[in-house]
Every structure is written in structure tokens, then in C-alpha cells.
Amino acid sequence: MALNPSLNPHVSVDCVIFGFNRDALRLLLIKRTVPNAVTELDDSYYALPGDLVNDSEDLNQAASRVLHELTGLQGIYLQQFQAFGDPLRISKPKDRNWLKGVRQDPDARVITVAYMALIDSKKVQLQPGSFSKEAIWVPISEVPELAFDHNEIYESALTALRERIQIQPIAFELLPEKFTMADLQLLYETILERDLDKRNFRRKMLNSGILIPLTEKQLGVSNKPARFYSYNRTMMEGVESQYINLRMEGTFTLFQ
Amino acid sequence: MALNPSLNPHVSVDCVIFGFNRDALRLLLIKRTVPNAVTELDDSYYALPGDLVNDSEDLNQAASRVLHELTGLQGIYLQQFQAFGDPLRISKPKDRNWLKGVRQDPDARVITVAYMALIDSKKVQLQPGSFSKEAIWVPISEVPELAFDHNEIYESALTALRERIQIQPIAFELLPEKFTMADLQLLYETILERDLDKRNFRRKMLNSGILIPLTEKQLGVSNKPARFYSYNRTMMEGVESQYINLRMEGTFTLFQ
DNA sequence: AATAGTTAGTGTCAATCTAACACTTTACAA
DNA sequence: TTGTAAAGTGTTAGATTGACACTAACTATT
């Protein structure tokens, strides 16, 4: 795969794949093994899933391909957010060693176009494919040192996610089809790293019209069962501006 | 320049440069001549200023370089907004003819990283350089057919500008150091293509604290002279989130 | 059967912000 | 002196925000 001659040696895509469960916001990483590692410690390290772009492929297609190969999923939220092109972004010895084993032209200058993906991590069955033997979900509080400039890319992605979640109804991409109001609030609180008022949150979400209340309720919980909701996708269809005020209390604005 | 061997034949930057005067929002375009034009009509056409990225150069540096060569300006607002990589983005015969005359490898697959620049167009003295003989300011209502996928890039830039102007205080980059409230309102109205209420606009801007009222007033006008303001750059320093609610009345939100 | 424990779900009020709306002021020109 | 043109100003009703505490519904335990 990596030695496929139709792959453009100068342009890659990398995917910052976020997932969520009741526990934490998580990042999907792949583990790499350096062929000619000098020490035991240099033996392996983590990276964002990514690949060179095929010459006949659009950037979005390349990102979808990486995501599909890794997770088996298609049609999920995948959004370009930034290109990275520092000439020194590939300079660590580990990175160069790995490239020597895997690329036709290991010294080529590579620009990468970074994508952010949002997945309900319970949907993911890591695929028996080129990446998956080594893929893991890491809580964002425990992201290790990554290959290349992938730490910088991941942090830009997280910043972009925090901004977008307050403007576009994308949080739902991280939740299952049916979820409770508490699930949704916990997700917002996790991403924004801020406590939100339960009543105000509920009011804001319900007034927005983007939630469909279901008749179904939680089963088998030892307390009052919560109602399930689902996301009203059709609500946003045909709306030219996707701009929605989902900002929560306490957000800095000059107008408060 | 274009035949410089250190230029990476696979990655370019393109700059969507917006300017403003009392008349209209304008786009800075360069005119190209096709070396082996088949007909008179194919003789010339317009494009966004751009260039291949040098192998030792960061993407931001490449964009700054293009801007500097064209306008002589440095330190102006220049923001990456999207990468474009459709494999068919270079397929029109005109484009291929031009590349043949100008690139070492005219068939190379090129991905471009697009930047948006905002300039007070009165500051620009088009430079006697590689581009400038042929550069013009075109009102955005009269943008002609452009090279490659540059129409698509320009339209994405305009959309991005419309969104950002309501979130970040960037409109000022298009105005001179000193401007009147009417100048600022006209700029917003032009970009957003919407009329705004004079009193509400004034109040919103003044309450935001991002304007410094000057004692200086207009001279030589045949009506009550307007006060000048300048933009309070220091206001935004050290603010981690650049998010500011500058949205004007009538913006679609689900929360109205 | 009663009680304890746990989370869901609900309402009000003061303060602020928004959107709509029209007249007075100040300069120059005629 | 009068006319013309743009600057500059205030109020009000309605909506939104942010702060705040109790009751309801279910299970597990005794």
C-alpha cells in the first residue's frame, strides 16, 4: 500500500478521529513499529491515522479511505480543518527511520491536510486491515507523544472542535442514535471542560428544535428512567448558513 | 521563478485577497497570457495570485511571499482557510496550455492551500514584480471566469469571510487606520449583503470595546462631520478564544 | 412493606440583549 | 437665510440569559 507508485509522495491526509463514551472523549491512534529501532524504547510509537494521497483521488476521498480502512465505517462526519506544511515537521529520527522502511522517497517534503472525524465509538469495530492490528482509543487527557507534528495537529483539531460545537449541531455525531439529555450535557461538558446548568442546558436544547423526543425511556436503571432523544437531521437541511447559537453560559463574548 | 527547481511541483498556495473602498468589496486578480493561445479569445484570463511552495518554506511563508511580491505589503491579515485537491481541478485546455509554458512538470497533480487576505486597498501599490504588470482589483459582483478551480476557491473564501466577520473582529483589516462609523457599517452591509439598523449597529460596536473614538472629525464634507474611530487591537491580545458575538440582527439562529 | 439512595425533571425572576422605530444637530452650499 | 445631506441620539416591548432548589420515579436494601 505505502509503496503504491500512484501515491503522491508530497501530499498526505491525517485524520483526527474523536469518539466518546460515558467515560471520556477519546482519540483513535495507530501504533507504529520502527523497523530499525536503535533502542527498545524507540521500538514503537503512536500516530494519527493517515496516508499519502493517491494521484487520482480527491482529498476528501483520501480521508474517507483512511477512515474506512481503519474503522469499516462510511458516511460519517469528516471535515477538513487545516493543512500543515512546516518543512521541519518530519525531522525526528524516529519519524525518519519509519519513513525509510515505508516510503519510496523518504526524504520528500510532505504537506498534510488534516481532517476531523466524529464517531460514536461504540459503532467502531476496528478492521482487520492495514492499520487496525495496532489501533487504540486514547482518552484525550492521556494522549502520548505522537509521530511527526501530530500532537500539534491533534491540538488544533480539539480547538476547532470546541469552537464548532458551539456553532454547529455536530455533537450528535459522537452519540448513538438514541441518547438522554444527561448524555448530551455530559458530552458538551467534556468537550468544553466546563460545568453547565442542567435546567438551562435542557431549555436551550429543547428550544432549538434540533432534538426529537422519543417515547422510549431508559430500562433497568435504579432511579427515575430518563427519556431518550434523537437528533433531528432534517431540521438543518436547506439551511444555507449552518450557524447556530449553541454557546453555553460563561462563554467569553464582548457582548455580555 | 516558476522554473526554480526547489519549488515543490505538487503543492501550491493561492491567495484570495479582498479589498474595500466606499464603492465595493473587491478581489485582487492577476491576468495571465496563454503562450500558445489558439484563438484571440483564449489570449488571456484571470487567476488568483498563487505559486508553488518552495521546498524549504512553510505554507504561511509561501502565502506571505506571494502577497508581498504582488503588493509590497507585509504583516497583513492572511489566514489559511481550505485546501483544494480535486484531481480534475486542472483540466481546462487554457490551464494546461499555460502550465506547459511555465512549469517544469505541467502534468503534476497539484494540491493548493488557499489563503484569505484582507487589505485596505488604498495601501496597495501594485509592485513592479513577477505578477504586478497584470494585476487588477475587481468588484466581487463582477468576478469573471477564472483559471483552474479559482472561482470555487474564491466563493469558499467569501463564504468563510461572511462567517468570520461575525465572530472575529477582522473587518478592520479592510479599513484604513481611521474610519467613521458609517464606513464600518457600510463594510458590514457590503460583506453581509444586508441592511443594518444604524442605531443598533452603533450601540453594538461601541459596547464591544473594540473601537477607540478619536477626537478627530471629518473635514471638508458638506454636512455634519463624522467622528473617526480606530480599532483597539490590544483589546483582543491574550484572549484565548477569539470568539466574539458580532452577529447582526436577522442572522438565522435557532434561538430567536 | 417501608425506607434509603439515586438520577430525572421542572419554574421563576432579575438582568441583559435585541429589534424596531423618528427626530434633532451640524456642517456646507445656494 | 434657507436648503440639503449625513451624523448622532433614546425608548420600549419582547426575548434570552443565568442563577437557583425542590419534587418525581425508579431500584435496592432492610
Image: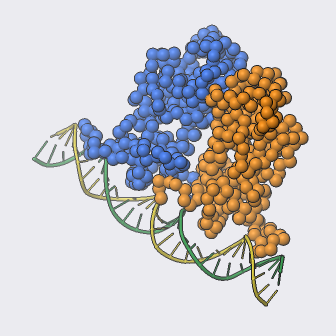
Chain colours: A blue, B orange, C green, D yellow
| Rendered position, A210 above or below B94 | below
A71 with respect to B250 (left or right): left
| Rendered position, A95 above or below B207 | above
Q: Quadrant of residue B113?
A: top right
| Residue visible at 64% across and 26% down in the picture | B87
Q: Quadrant of residue D9?
A: bottom right
Residue ranking furthest to the front: B39
- Can see residue A87? no
In the rendering, at what x and y percent does residue B22 appear? 75, 59
| Rendered position, B235 above or below A186 | below
In the rendering, at what x and y percent does residue A164 appear? 54, 43
B229 vs A146, nearest the viewer: B229
A83 vs B110, nearest the viewer: B110
Q: Quadrant of residue A229?
A: top left
| Rendered position, B37 above or below A209 | above
| Residue visible at 63% across and 56% down in the picture | B193
In the rendering, at what x and y percent does residue A17 appear? 51, 30
In the rendering, at what x and y percent does residue C21 appear? 56, 74
D5 vs A188, nearest the viewer: D5
- Quadrant holding the N terminus of chain B: top right
B30 vs A62, nearest the viewer: B30
- Can see residue B172? yes
B95 with respect to A21 (left or right): right
